[in-house]
């Protein structure tokens, strides 16, 4: 199911004017805080009045009341109903769903590893458990398109990784298309196949994830330490089915060698050709074209001069496996 | 307690209970509308709701006579026999306690987390569905406490009741009306004091009851 948006919304001094398309699959809605990401979700769902058009699978839903739009929304703060148990929360959505994505409510609970918690009140669940219940509840309502507002915000790093895998797997298992709001580029690359990048209420770039992240306009949205490139990868060893994803390779994590390196510990060595060398104060940002796509490396001025890196020159990129 | 005093107490309780039951659904509906942030005509509705507070109670009783009396605007075509009956006393009381009742229920609604209301909308629940399954269950301890407070206020209603329903012993004579009646008689002070003590006891019991009920209901809700 495809989601097309052309949204205009004014809130005090802030103006949102965003046009984008989120195709089937997982799209990351990326941007710095205050860029209007949550306002987009509020406008898409109709929770905040806005002007413009929202089309879901070609159908104009912009004038439909929020509960009939067919959009699901997982909030940053799980928003579980305190007067229901875990089962009650999931059942609330299950009973109102026009169709069922799983054969039973218990199947959904099992999928999210919630069987042991079903009869627990939601008040004393941990952050990770709350997030899983919120996700299970959203899935139980069988949305045509699922929106997620920074769903990882309340989770620690380990739980975050597990949650990302659940999301990616959920898309494969249940075929639910998603728009995931995040300001973390690593999270975005771990799940998304498409990207909508937003800044100051406007869409800066949107489209295929790898291509969109290569645009110079996109780089302006990143903190210097986040600058890097998305390289396609396949997650093979995982509790869930193998799936394709991107890995965000930070320029600071890539070493360059002017000759083919040997007898070194780095597990990933990619041969490539220098495309450009950009001056960044006392650093140099070198772009290398490799068989896995472009790779960026940030070097000191001295290192860049010593290696004699100029466009057209051959070089080898070295990446420590642990930085991925 | 004498038989007459018991009769007065029973009349009072009966009038207050009916007033609460009759006004409850309307108070809930109006309070919910007023608790919505984007309601059109909210100021007008709010103003109308508060009319009984602004108008003199005797005037409210008189207006009720004009509207619901046997020869009233609605009373005649509908064939109502409310004036000078127990139901009439309850009706006048219901109108007088309505603003207070709406206010406490509205506070209870406004105290429920609006974000949960949005969450329910995103799970395909309609406005009425959200009201019945999210707002009402979460607000009911507050509604219950509001009802007890309104009940206590109903026990003390005077001006509108005496105008619309009179002060007929055994039918419409509630505690405050009885106190007034005995004070009109020479040497009625002792009896007035006894009735006042009874009134006081009922009011205190009401307040304590409201507190206990709210605590119990909140605990039960979040168990």
Image (spheres, coloured by chain):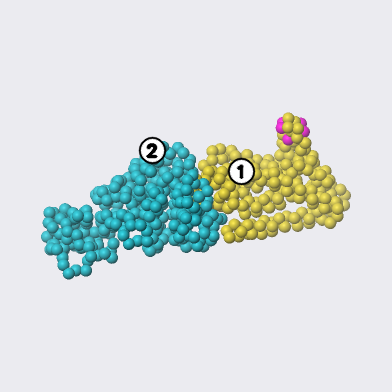
Chain colours: A cyan, B yellow
Q: On the rendered image, what quadrant is the C terminus of chain B found in?
A: bottom right
Residue A120: x, y in percent? 53, 61
Residue indicated by mark 2? A58
**Residue B218 shown left or right of residue B11 in the figure:** left
Q: Nearer the viewer, residue A276 or A170?
A: A170
Circle on res. A124? none
Q: Nearer the viewer, residue A110 or A219?
A: A110
Q: Nearer the viewer, residue B63 or A115?
A: A115
* Residue at screen point 72% across, 57% down: B205
* Residue at screen point 39% across, 49% down: A175
Q: Chain of mark 1?
A: B
Q: Is residue B72 magenta?
A: yes
Residue indicated by mark 1? B29
> Does residue A281 appear in the picture of this structure?
no
Q: Chain of mark 2?
A: A
Residue A189: x, y in percent? 31, 54
Q: Which residues are magenta?
A: B68-74
Q: On the rendered image, what quadrant is the N terminus of chain B found in?
A: bottom right
Residue B90: x, y in percent? 74, 44
């Amino acid at each position: 199911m495809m989601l097309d948006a052309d949204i205009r919304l004014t809130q005090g001094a802030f103006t949102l004017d965003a046009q984008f398309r989120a195709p089937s699959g997982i799209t990351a809605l990326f941007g710095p805080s205050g860029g209007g990401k949550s306002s987009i979700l509020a406008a898409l769902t109709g929770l905040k009045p806005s002007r413009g058009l929202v089309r879901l699978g070609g159908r104009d839903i912009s004038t439909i009341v929020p509960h009939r739009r067919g959009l699901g929304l997982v909030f940053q703060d799980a928003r579980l109903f305190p007067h229901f148990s875990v089962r009650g929360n999931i059942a609330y959505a299950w009973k109102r769903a026009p169709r069922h994505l799983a054969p039973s409510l218990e199947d959904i609970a099992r999928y999210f590893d919630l069987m042991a918690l079903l009869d627990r009140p939601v008040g004393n669940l941990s952050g990770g458990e709350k997030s899983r219940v919120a996700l299970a509840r959203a899935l139980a309502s069988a949305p045509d398109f699922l929106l997620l507002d920074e769903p990882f915000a309340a989770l620690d790093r380990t739980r975050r990784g597990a949650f990302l895998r659940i999301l990616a797997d959920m898309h494969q298992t249940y075929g639910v298309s998603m728009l995931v709001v995040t300001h973390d580029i690593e999270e975005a690359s771990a799940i998304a196949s498409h990207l909508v990048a937003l800044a100051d209420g406007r869409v800066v770039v949107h489209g295929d994830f790898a291509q969109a992240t290569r645009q110079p306009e996109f780089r302006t949205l990143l903190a210097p330490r986040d600058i890097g490139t998305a390289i396609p990868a396949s997650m093979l060893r995982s509790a869930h089915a193998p799936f394709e994803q991107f890995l965000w390779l930070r320029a600071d994590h890539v070493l360059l060698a002017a000759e083919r390196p040997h007898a070194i510990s780095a597990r990933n060595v990619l041969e490539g050709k220098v495309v450009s060398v950009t001056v960044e104060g006392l650093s140099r940002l070198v772009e290398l074209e490799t068989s896995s796509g472009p790779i960026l490396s940030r070097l000191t001025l001295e290192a860049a001069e010593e290696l004699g890196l100029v466009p057209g020159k051959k070089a080898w990129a070295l990446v420590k496996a642990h930085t991925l | 307690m004498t038989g007459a005093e018991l009769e007065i107490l029973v009349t009072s309780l009966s009038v207050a209970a009916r007033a609460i039951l009759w006004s409850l659904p309307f108070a809930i509906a109006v309070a919910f509308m007023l608790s919505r942030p984007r309601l059109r005509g909210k100021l007008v509705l709010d103003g109308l709701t508060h009319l009984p507070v602004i108008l003199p109670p005797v005037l409210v009783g008189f207006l009720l006579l004009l509207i619901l009396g046997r020869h009233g605007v609605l009373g005649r075509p509908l064939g109502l026999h409310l004036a000078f009956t127990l139901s009439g006393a309850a009706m006048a009381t219901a109108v007088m306690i309505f603003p207070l009742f709406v206010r406490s229920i509205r506070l209870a609604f406004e105290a429920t987390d609006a974000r949960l209301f949005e969450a329910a909308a995103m799970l395909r629940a309609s406005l009425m569905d959200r009201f019945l399954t999210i707002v009402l269950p979460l607000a009911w301890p507050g509604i219950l406490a509001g009802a007890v407070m309104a009940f206590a206020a109903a026990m003390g209603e005077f001006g509108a009741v005496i105008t619309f329903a009179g002060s007929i012993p055994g039918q419409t004579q509630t505690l405050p009306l009885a106190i007034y009646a005995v004070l009109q008689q020479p040497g009625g002070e002792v009896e007035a004091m006894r009735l006042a003590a009874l009134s006081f006891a009922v009011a205190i019991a009401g307040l304590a009851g409201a507190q206990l009920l709210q605590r119990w209901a909140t605990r039960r809700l979040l168990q």
